[in-house]
Image (cartoon, rainbow, N blue to C red):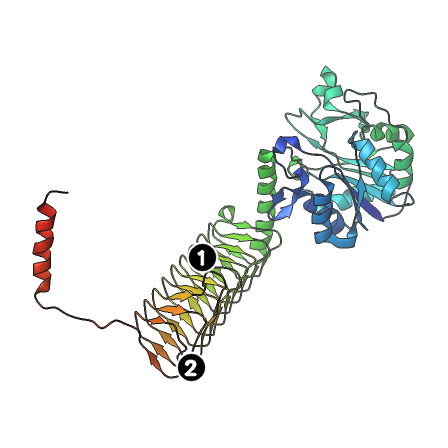
Amino acid sequence: MSTKSRFVGVVLAAGEGTRMKSSRPKVLHEIAGRPMVAWVVGAALDAGAERCVVVVGHKRDEVMAALTERFGERVQFAVQEEQRGTGHAVQHAMSQCLSDYDGSVLILYGDCPCLRADRLQELAALTANHTFALVTSHLDEPRGYGRILRTAGAVVGIREDKDCDAAQRAIQEVNPGLYAADAAFLRTSLGQLTTDNAQGELYLTDVCAIAAQAGVVGDLHAPMEELRGVNDRWELSLCAKTLRARSLEALARSGVGMADPSAVYIDADCEVEPDVTIAPGVHLRGRCVIRRGAVLEVGCVLTDVVVESGATLLPYTVASDSTIGPLANVGPFSHLRPKTVLHEGAKVGNFCETKKTIVGKGSKVNHLSYVGDGVLGEGVNIGAGTIFCNYDGVQKHTTTLKDGVFIGSDSQLVAPLTIGEGAYVASGSTVTKDVPADALAMSRTKQVNKEGYASRLRARMKVAKKSPTK
């Protein structure tokens, strides 16, 4: 029996997951922006595991790439070419990566994303006095789960659902599949497994009976909500709901204001500081950072966006890969495309779109405008309906507006173009040449008024309307 507190995690993630009906490996389906297997590995590492060994098989290159990107050298991989049961999977982990390890081993499933780090710490701690320990739970309808067998209150074995007799099927204490074992004991007991069962596989659950014959099996109880496995899309959504409620409660208790947390969606890798206000319908995706005092109104959808202190996003703002500066104001119904940067106090108003554009301090793009590939200085004002004509069919070009530039409504700025400091562009202009500082640019056809012509025009149109169609 090991008295050591050190442990590693073994995560079983080799299966295909056919019930997901997807070309993507089951364990890579995401919850709150993370593959579900990453939730499991993360929980084990947060609990104190020295490293995690992930057993991979189906589309293993994709699984390995996703986990290496997130966890680096803290994760190792064992390959299970042929899936012959959970015991067979752990045999591969022990032989390929843990042949000399002498601590404890925490064994987890890669499709159980709701595991809590503190629960895993409790389970690992049981190996100080037990060669083998497990987590149990209760279900009113336990179909599909292995049943916990007890004698005089002590766990003596686990019977898989397909191998249960009628009496055993009535047992409501189930095995969710979380184990901790002394490494030396685990190696020995794995060598004793047989395929004498309904599946013809090597069951890891048979290790429990071997441990019970040698001594006392440690066990602890946990609610099924945090132990649930994912087999299909519905169960994925149930786990997502659990994890979302858990993270939103933590945010609310940290000082984030949410009128209705059940209507807010925030990916796990987002950072939200205290004193942020988030209205219903907000989605924060990827790796957003929302600084103290920012306000996100109804329906905002942000992906990889930094929102600085005191900024306000009015309803239905959509932004990605952008930075919104302190005290900036965006929306409603604005679209900030990638590489948009708004400096302090900048404004992008309703029904505006930006792309790869810097908007300087205090500058305004008020409404109904497209500003693409632009560099706006400080105090620039862009009137309604302005278009940055940045694409010539082959290349994108930059429009630069120096400090204090004023662009009148319904103007077209044809890039490449520079408009000098303090210059004006008259409304309705199409500007194709650079404008010097402090100049007024006008590009309009001359207006002609023909007095009395309107009534004659209307009369002619009425006659044409009554004439038979040719």
Instruction: Return the residue found at the far top.
Output: 166
Q: Looking at the image, tell me whether mark 1 or mark 2 is earlier in sequence order.
A: 1
Asked if one can make out residue 182 in the rendered structure from this viewpoint, the answer is: no
Give the residue number, with chain letter if any, for mark 1: 317
Residue 184: x percent and y percent?
91, 39
Tell me what residue is drawn at x 36 percent, y 82 percent: 439
Residue 306 or 45: which is nearer the viewer?
306
Taking the spot 77% from the left edge, 46% from the top edge, the residue there is 121
Task: Categorize mark 2 by other alpha carbons within 10 Å: few (<14), some (14-19), many (20+).
Answer: many
Secondary element at tag 1: loop
User: As drawn, is 26 to the left or to the right of 9?
Assistant: left
Q: Quadrant of the N terminus?
A: top right
- The amino acid on which the numbered mark 1 sits, given as a three-letter code, is Thr
Residue linked to disc 2 = 421
Q: Does the CB distance between marks 1 and 2 fall below 8 Å?
A: no
Left or right: residue 448 versus residue 131 is: left
Amino acid at pointer 2: Glu
Give the farthest residue toward the bottom: 438
- Residue at x 8% of width, y 60% of height: 455
Of circles 1 and 2, the one toward us is: 2
- Judging depth in this view, the residue of 82 and 12 nearest the camera is 82
Q: Position of residue 360 (x, y in %)?
A: 47, 73
